[in-house]
Image: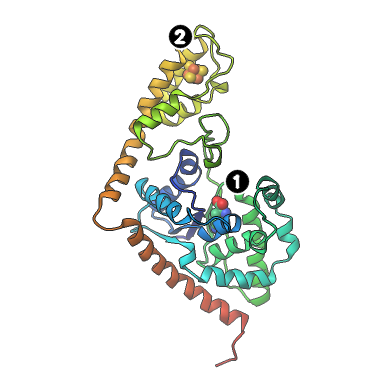
Amino acid sequence: MTGTVLSGLRPTGRVHLGNYFGAVKNWVDLQNSGKYRCYFFVADLHALTTDYADTQSLAANTREAVLDWLAVGLDPAKATVFLQSRVPQHAELALYFSMITPLGWLERVPTYKDQIEQLRSKDLGTHGFLGYPVLMTADIAVYRADLVPVGEDQASHLEISREIVRRFNGLYGDVFPEPKALFTPTPKVNGIDGRKMSKSYGNTIGITEGAESVREKVMAMVTDPARARRQDPGRPDHCNLFPFHQLYSPPAEVAVVDVECRTAARGCVDCKKHLIGNLNAALEPFRARRAALLAASSDVVRDVLHAGDAKARTAAEATMEKVRAAVRLSPEP
Ligand code: TRP
Ligand code: SF4
């Protein structure tokens, strides 16, 4: 073991192909490399930063997400899988960090003002939302993690995390390693309408979605808009379907699709049918594992989280003892 890896995702329910290639697949690969101590968690406190007024689906979304994580291969025997809110040390460390984090750092995070604009229906002029990166820093630092697999969209958060940790170490002594983002090159996965795949756009394909539903969604996908008639040549680089072939069809078949599309030797309906076969074959083991988890006599999600929470708390508390000593709040014994 050469380091500690930590990452989290807000609970948004079942995992779609965008989440999978953007995060969860990398987690499984890191876990299976055997090189790192791994922590993966449901960031339910982070969900509260934007959804504090609507918490009714949080618990169900957590359950669905964890089921899918396990279905795609996250293994509690190899990684600690837990729920953020069940490890109160995250919140405690976030409070210490909040004391030393200048407001200007938080206000300058590029996504901060963007998000407030984009989510106009919610009042995000809150302390908690401004403090999002402070809590995220605590998530990482409370395990003294040094590697954080995240998408490029989290780069500015990781930058602040490094600065907060540096400032803490400067003030109180070297307690934390500086965390490094691990940007894994991820294929771009768009939704069935060609926009970024996102639950809020309703354009997702689930990693454990039923075969028939996957078929219907692929059949409805928009292809090269310039290919109005069957005999018009197509352009794979302008087609929303082609990237899915690149992900799910064998390389030799992708090459054939490329040629036959450009020469109009292949029609889009036929092209979709081939993709559906390959995609459904790839998803089948995930569906089967999810079904097996659901059929188990015990509540697997609850058991996995309970065990993970306890392991996480032990590790987090060891760090907090160092933190409290470093800050020197209590009188010397
Ligand atoms: N902000 C991350 C996201 O939206 C989720 C997250 C919370 C996280 N805490 C983290 C990721 C700590 C990595 C490390 O995807
Ligand atoms: Fe897209 Fe395939 Fe149609 Fe070409 S033939 S436009 S790759 S669906």
> Is residue 126 at least partly visible in the picture?
yes
Among all residues in the image, which is located at the extreme left? Answer: 297
> Which mark, residue 66?
none
Q: Secondary structure at mark 1?
A: helix
Determine the image quadrant of residue 124.
bottom right
Q: Which residue is mark 2?
A: 265
Mark linked to residue 152? 1
Spatial CA distance of label 2 from label 1 is 38 Å
**Amino acid type, residue under disc 2 in the picture:** Ala
Which amino acid does the dot numbered 1 rest on? Glu
216 and 110: which one is in front?
A: 216
- State the residue lying farthest toward the bottom: 333
- At label 2, counting other C-alpha atoms closer than 10 Å, the crowd grade (few under 14, some 14-19, many 20 or more) is some
Tell me the residue at 35%/54% (across/down).
75
Q: Which percent across, then down, holds residue 202?
A: 52, 37
Residue at horizontal 50 percent and vertical 28 percent from the top: 243
At x 57%, y 82%, the residue is 325
Q: Is residue 133 left or right of residue 310?
A: right
Relative side of 16 to 293, left or right:
right
